[in-house]
Image (cartoon, rainbow, N blue to C red):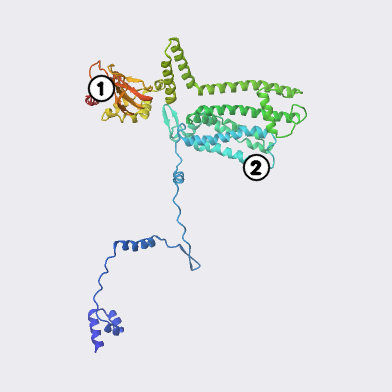
């Protein structure tokens, strides 16, 4: 009876499939008491919830191992370790893209590439004579010589195909950045330059004659025609280096060493022609051949003397040519070295000449020794701090636009902080920068005195000044530091005859900007709003 009632109840409540399942397990259902739905669990504490979520998040981040199937059998590969983050310098290298146009005057990458090309050119310049004269090229090492030769040729080709067509150049005042867009075509633009024509000639394959003569280094002499890249590299290096005279000294010394190098090669060739050790004059074949021949070249070209007398006609002619060339070449090198050193010390020589002229003038008029010492101190400090005596002598050679650019870069950070000019027209401040004059005051020098007619305004660039008073002018009322302004009342007040109201002297070495009243008036004519603002601040 119970089974029939249970079956009917299930039929009324559930579908047929569910009822069959419940009928099979009727004993379990009848025994189990009815239960209410379970209450939701209480929320976990804030700390415990976070702790439980953390492992789950870590499990989600874990990547399943890579699985492949081989011949129907699954194979799990171990997971690769996580790579460390890429360094910034390596990322910068990988993200670098070769430029479509190169500025040969400012691009540092091009200067580095020029160094590689000049290194390849120097390989040919220095090693071709050595391989021709000395027996250093043998059948055992010929493959190494050829590898170095063709590496240099590859650098030549890269320079001609990749770098040279991308160089910017000026045509009719316009900067051409893409030769491929020129109406004449890229070929005309490249061959328009003499250097490009020489680049093509320098790669002429004279090596085809190796079939008839063997590997003769003299057949590579066209590679020396790429000499213009050497002078271009010199210009770029002098523009990049802060002390270019150091590079000029090294370059001039290299000229002398190369002339001795060529003479050493010729001497060995002459000795081999006459026969090694055949006379006392020729190289006897003992010791290091290059070092001994180079020693002979030094004594010959610099005319030191002490060499064996030549005996044959060939030796006499060779030695005469050596003496003539040595005197001529050595005198040129000495003259170039003198010019390089003179150019490097031109500024200091000018400073010495100015000081000597001033001292001579002071001595002729019996200026007191104390005043002379202060003037000498001013010369010394101004030269060491600025590297020149008058900045205007340098800037006057530049056009107005470049003078403004330099003045903005050097002085704008100081003038822009002056409270007097804050709120004024920015262009007016730029115009002021070109009218400022830099003056150095020695410790104890009076910048202005009470009662003087005020014609200038002062901006402290470096150092400190003090407002002093008292009967002996030793009482310090206030100390004014860098970035401050004084003297603006006399400069901005209307009318004339405005007198100073305080004594101001330099506490130490003080570098001040001076703005003349006439210059300020000429500027404010074009900026009436700034003029009103400045007069308001001066009251």
Image mark for residue 473: none
At a point 22% along the width and 81% down the height, the residue shown is 12
Residue 185 picture location, percent across and down: 46, 34
Badge 1: residue crowd in 10 Å (few <14, some 14–19, many ≥20): some
Residue 255 picture location, percent across and down: 59, 27
Whichever of callouts 2 and 1 sits on the residue coming sooner in the sequence is: 2
Q: CA distance from mark 2 to mark 1?
A: 84 Å
Residue 321 picture location, percent across and down: 68, 22
Q: Quadrant of the C terminus?
A: top left
Secondary element at tag 2: helix
**421 and 442: which one is in front?**
442
Residue 245 picture location, percent across and down: 52, 26
Do tag 2 and tag 1 residues touch (Cβ < 8 Å)? no
Residue 160, can we see it? no
Q: Residue furthest top?
A: 365
At a point 33% along the width and 20% down the height, the residue shown is 447
Q: Residue furthest right?
A: 278
Q: Quadrant of the N terminus?
A: bottom left
Badge 2: residue crowd in 10 Å (few <14, some 14–19, many ≥20): few
Residue that mark 1 sits on: 489
**Side (left or right) of 89 relative to 322:** left
At a point 68% along the width and 29% down the height, the residue shown is 295
Secondary element at tag 1: helix
Q: Quadrant of residue 29?
A: bottom left
Image mark for residue 143: 2
Q: What is the number of callouts on the image?
A: 2
């Amino acid at each position: 009876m119970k089974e029939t009632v249970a079956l009917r109840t299930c039929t009324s409540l559930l579908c047929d499939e569910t009822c069959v399942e419940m009928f099979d397990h009727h004993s379990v259902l009848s025994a189990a008491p009815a239960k209410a739905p379970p209450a939701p669990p209480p929320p976990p504490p804030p700390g415990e919830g976070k702790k439980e979520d953390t492992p789950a998040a870590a499990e989600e981040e874990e990547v399943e191992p890579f699985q492949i199937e081989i011949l129907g059998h699954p194979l799990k590969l171990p997971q690769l370790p996580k790579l460390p983050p890429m360094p910034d310098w390596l990322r910068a290298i990988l993200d670098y893209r070769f430029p479509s146009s190169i500025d040969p005057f400012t691009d540092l990458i091009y200067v580095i590439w020029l160094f590689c090309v000049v290194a390849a050119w120097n390989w040919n310049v220095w090693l071709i004579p050595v391989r021709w004269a000395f027996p250093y090229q043998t059948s055992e090492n010929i493959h190494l010589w050829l590898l170095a030769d063709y590496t240099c040729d590859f650098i030549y080709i890269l320079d001609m195909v990749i770098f040279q067509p991308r160089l910017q150049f000026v045509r009719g005042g316009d900067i051409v950045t893409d030769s491929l867009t020129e109406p004449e075509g890229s070929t005309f633009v490249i061959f328009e330059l003499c250097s490009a024509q020489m680049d093509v000639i320098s790669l002429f394959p004279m090596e085809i004659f190796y079939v008839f003569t063997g590997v003769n280094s003299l057949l590579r002499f066209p590679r020396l025609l790429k000499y213009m890249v050497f002078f271009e590299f010199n210009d770029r290096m002098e523009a990049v280096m802060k002390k270019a005279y150091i590079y000029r000294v090294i370059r001039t010394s290299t000229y002398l060493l190369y002339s001795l190098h060529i003479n050493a090669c010729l001497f060995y060739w002459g000795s081999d022609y006459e026969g090694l050790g055949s006379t006392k004059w020729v190289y006897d074949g003992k010791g290091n051949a290059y070092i001994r021949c180079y020693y002979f070249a030094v004594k010959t070209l610099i005319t030191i003397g002490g060499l064996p007398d030549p005996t044959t006609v060939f030796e006499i002619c060779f030695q005469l040519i050596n003496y003539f060339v040595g005197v001529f070449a050595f005198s040129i090198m000495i003259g170039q070295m003198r010019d390089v050193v003179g150019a490097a010390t031109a500024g200091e020589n000018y400073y010495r000449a100015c000081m000597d002229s001033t001292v001579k003038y002071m001595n002729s008029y019996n200026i007191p020794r104390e005043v002379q010492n202060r003037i000498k101190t001013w010369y010394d400090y101004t030269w060491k701090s600025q590297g020149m005596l008058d900045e205007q002598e340098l800037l006057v050679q530049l056009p107005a636009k470049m003078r403004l650019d330099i003045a903005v870069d050097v002085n704008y950070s100081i003038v822009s902080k002056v409270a007097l000019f804050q709120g004024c027209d920015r262009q007016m401040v730029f115009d002021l920068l070109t009218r400022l004059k830099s003056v150095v005051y020695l410790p104890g020098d009076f910048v202005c005195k009470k009662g003087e007619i005020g014609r200038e305004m002062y901006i402290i660039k470096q150092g400190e000044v003090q407002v002093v008073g008292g009967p002996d002018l030793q009482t310090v009322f206030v100390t004014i530091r860098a970035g401050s302004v004084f003297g603006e009342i006399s400069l901005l007040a209307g009318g004339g005859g405005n007198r100073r109201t305080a004594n101001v002297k330099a506490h130490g070495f003080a570098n001040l900007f001076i703005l003349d009243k006439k210059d300020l008036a000429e500027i404010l004519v074009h900026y009436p709003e700034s003029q009103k603002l400045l007069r308001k601040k001066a009251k």
